[in-house]
């Protein structure tokens, strides 16, 4: 082979080898960016719920509560992935609630959103009004509701709320704080389901609807 031709071929080959890493690097840079890190949610302290309710032509009230089960929720985390939400306890992936849950909640009256009502029994949540309402619990999966099953009352109390103006306590309507603790079974319930609380008046009107969801 001619020496000049051999030298030209060698130079050309070196040029190809030198260009190849650059081309590979350029191709590597053109790859789509990696997806952002999954959103991680902690549930330390339980699953909290809060909502407002109102009795037609009567008082309005606030519901505060949480769902617990020993230390289960303290160690529970959820991760949003491309395939949906994944729940883990430590390194173990789980899909169901524990067998038993404890629902704790308090109820007290509050001014209605449409404005303050005149002072009187109609503006405050009385024991008669509370005892006339019925509470139903459901598990919600998508748009479907199913009964939460057997519910056991663990604790119930009604405590008077002392007014700020203690000197006028005898002249003001009595106000109360209702406290409840309820046990419910949930061993076969997916963690993606929501616990729905519906309060109904004696005539079937929905006075409040709140939900606890992960």
Image (cartoon, rainbow, N blue to C red):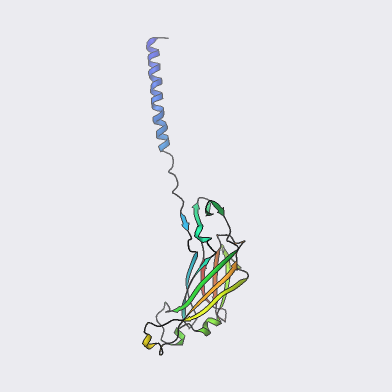
Name the residue at the front extreme. 70
Taking depth in this image into account, of 146 and 195 the one nearest to the observer is 195
The residue located at (40%, 31%) in the rendering is 23
Q: Is residue 4 visible?
A: yes
The quarter of the displayed image where residue 155 is located: bottom right
State whether residue 10 is above or below residue 165. above
State whether residue 103 is above or below residue 18. below
Q: Quadrant of the N terminus?
A: top left
- Report the side of 176 relative to 98 (left or right): left
Q: Position of residue 45 (x, y in %)?
A: 48, 64
- Report the side of 120 relative to 154 (left or right): left
Number of numbered callouts drawn = 0
Taking depth in this image into account, of 154 and 21 the one nearest to the observer is 154
The residue located at (39%, 30%) in the rendering is 22
Q: Position of residue 195 (x, y in %)?
A: 55, 66
The residue located at (50%, 72%) in the rendering is 105
The quarter of the displayed image where residue 100 is located: bottom right
State whether residue 165 is above or below residue 183. below
Taking depth in this image into account, of 87 and 4 the one nearest to the observer is 87
The residue located at (41%, 28%) in the rendering is 20
Taking depth in this image into account, of 100 and 71 the one nearest to the observer is 71
Q: Is residue 87 visible?
A: no
Q: Position of residue 27 (x, y in %)?
A: 42, 35
Name the residue at the bottom extreme. 171
């Amino acid at each position: 082979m001619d020496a000049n031709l051999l030298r030209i071929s060698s130079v050309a080959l070196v040029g190809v080898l030198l260009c190849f890493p650059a081309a590979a690097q350029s191709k590597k840079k053109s790859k789509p960016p990696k997806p952002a890190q999954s959103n991680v949610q902690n549930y330390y302290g339980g699953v909290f719920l809060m909502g407002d309710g109102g009795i037609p032509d009567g008082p309005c009230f606030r519901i505060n509560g949480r769902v617990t089960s020993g230390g289960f929720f303290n160690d529970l985390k959820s991760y949003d992935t491309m395939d949906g939400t994944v729940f883990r306890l430590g390194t173990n992936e789980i899909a169901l609630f524990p067998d038993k849950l404890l629902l704790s909640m308090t109820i007290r009256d509050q001014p209605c959103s449409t404005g303050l009502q005149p002072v009187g029994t109609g503006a405050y949540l009385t024991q008669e009004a509370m005892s006339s309402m019925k509470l139903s619990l459901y598990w919600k999966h998508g748009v479907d509701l199913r009964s939460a099953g057997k519910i056991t009352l663990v604790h119930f109390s009604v405590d008077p709320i002392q007014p700020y103006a203690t000197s006028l306590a005898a002249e003001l309507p009595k106000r109360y704080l209702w406290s409840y603790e309820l046990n419910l079974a949930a061993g076969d319930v997916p963690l993606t389901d929501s616990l729905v609380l519906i309060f109904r008046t004696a005539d079937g009107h929905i006075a409040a609807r709140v939900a606890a969801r992960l």
